[in-house]
Image (cartoon, rainbow, N blue to C red):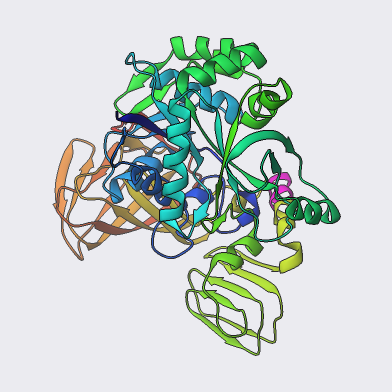
Amino acid sequence: MTIQVQPVIMAGGSGTRLWPLSRSGFPKQFLALDGRSSLFQQAAERLAALNGPGIATLTPLVVGNDEHRFLLLEQLREIGITGATLLLEPMGRNTAPALTLAALAALEDGVDPVLAMTPADQTVTDVPAFTAAMRRAAELAHGGAIVTLGIVPTRPETGYGYIQAATPGRESAVLGFVEKPDAATAERYVREGCLWNGGIFVLKASVWMSALERFRPDIGSAVRLAWQGRQRDASFVRPDKLAFAAAPAESIDYAVMEQVPKAGLPMQVVPMAAGWNDLGAWDAVWQVLPKDGAGNAALGDVVLEGCSGTLVHASERLVAAVGLNDVVVVETADAVMVSSQARSQDVKRIVARLEADGRGEKNLHRKVHRPWGWYDSIDAGPRFQVKRIMVKPGASLSLQMHHHRAEHWIVVQGTAEVTCGDKKLMLSENQSTYIPLGETHRLANPGKVPLEIIEVQSGSYLGEDDIVRFEDHYGRTG
């Protein structure tokens, strides 16, 4: 007997506590904090690894933000995963509506697979242990059980919820879920064999829908309406916006999982000791990174002198630190954040202040990713802005026009196909062209290597919203 497992990746989080590396336009699940692959990519690869004797994994379902759809596709492509379906939430409604979308999608083809659901922003250092626990959970779920993975605690932790098991620390029935405790209660929970709630759940799609109908039929009915009105565009599935907006914003835990044991219904927990961490703040990132003999973790061009217990993450420049103890320093092209380890959770307060002040650093990096490549705003002043632009092979920007600015383009690598009004020309390295204000234009890369240009904008208004799109391969307007 082969169990069909449907990987479900929840990729809609914002990760404000990892600012300035994580931003709403490029949240933490897309960060390669180890310098190799992103948290989202790691989650996708872990679930794909469940495939093996007795278990057949399907192509993943990814629930994410419409704004991040091309990031999701590109990061899956980078690790060789194709054919995934992206369920794009028109607005955030927490994880219960998100999982309901995935369950309805999984039931579309007349099958009832086991949903293996995991957040996209966690890390695991012992992948074989994760795989063994998830495969065991899938076996239990195939028999109709609701299963959660309980993380074996490594310390008393006040930032996590806990799971009470019938047999402490062992695979057994779930007695209940308890909220984030104070320090003394956390120590007691660990002594009593409680497990951390990592938000990883395994159950059949039909079992989720039945449980939702029992405990939160309002969520079920709203999401069903949104699903009925969905639109599909290649890999992207968009639920009806108005119907989805009517779904109550509720987590899987509050909506269903905490209610199951209270109602006396069966639920199983499978313990997992796999070096799990949800990377909820910079102190958690420090915990999982390699460290020197003084407990320092450094990524990028970093020089440390007389430091201990310190994390320094350098993205663009040399960062030198002297005499720091238990401090976090994170440098990006447009922002530097310094915090004590103990207060790193409070970075979210900085993000709230940036939002209140209307600061762009809350949302986007200086380098902004687009479906065709990226641009990096390297300099700006009154009436001018300079950008470095990369266009992927075979990709093109939209056919567009600006009301308030003209542009100069200089090719520094690759070949550019330029449309300017009714003219089309090819430019190679060291060649340039001028796009007058108000002229219809397009930039494309017909070559086999990335195209890089320097763009100098000049005009009375240089905002990104001064753009009129006439044709766009990526479904964007305005």
Q: How many marks?
A: 0
Side of 24 relative to 443 (left or right): right
Residue 353 belongs to magenta span: yes
How would you classify the magenta stretch by its main secondary structure?
Answer: helix
In the displayed structure, 35 sits above or below 321; it is: above
Camera-nearest residue between 144 and 68: 144
Q: Position of residue 356 (x, y in %)?
A: 73, 45
| Residue 240 visible in image | yes
Q: Farthest residue toward the front?
A: 167
**Residue segment shown in magenta:** 351-357
Camera-nearest residue between 48 and 324: 48
In the displayed structure, 440 sits above or below 383; it is: above
Q: Position of residue 444 (x, y in %)?
A: 22, 45
Camera-nearest residue between 446 and 148: 148
Camera-nearest residue between 375 and 277: 277
If the image is split into quadrants, where does the N terminus sit?
Answer: top left
Side of 260 relative to 384 (left or right): right
Residue 174 belongs to magenta span: no
For the point 51% across and 12% down, which residue is it? 224
Q: Position of residue 180 (x, y in %)?
A: 76, 45
Residue 81, located in which quarter of the rendered image?
top left
In the displayed structure, 340 sits above or below 376; it is: below
Side of 72 relative to 247 (left or right): left
Q: Position of residue 399 (x, y in %)?
A: 29, 35
Residue 304, located in which quarter of the rendered image?
bottom right
For the point 49% across and 68% down, which residue is it? 315
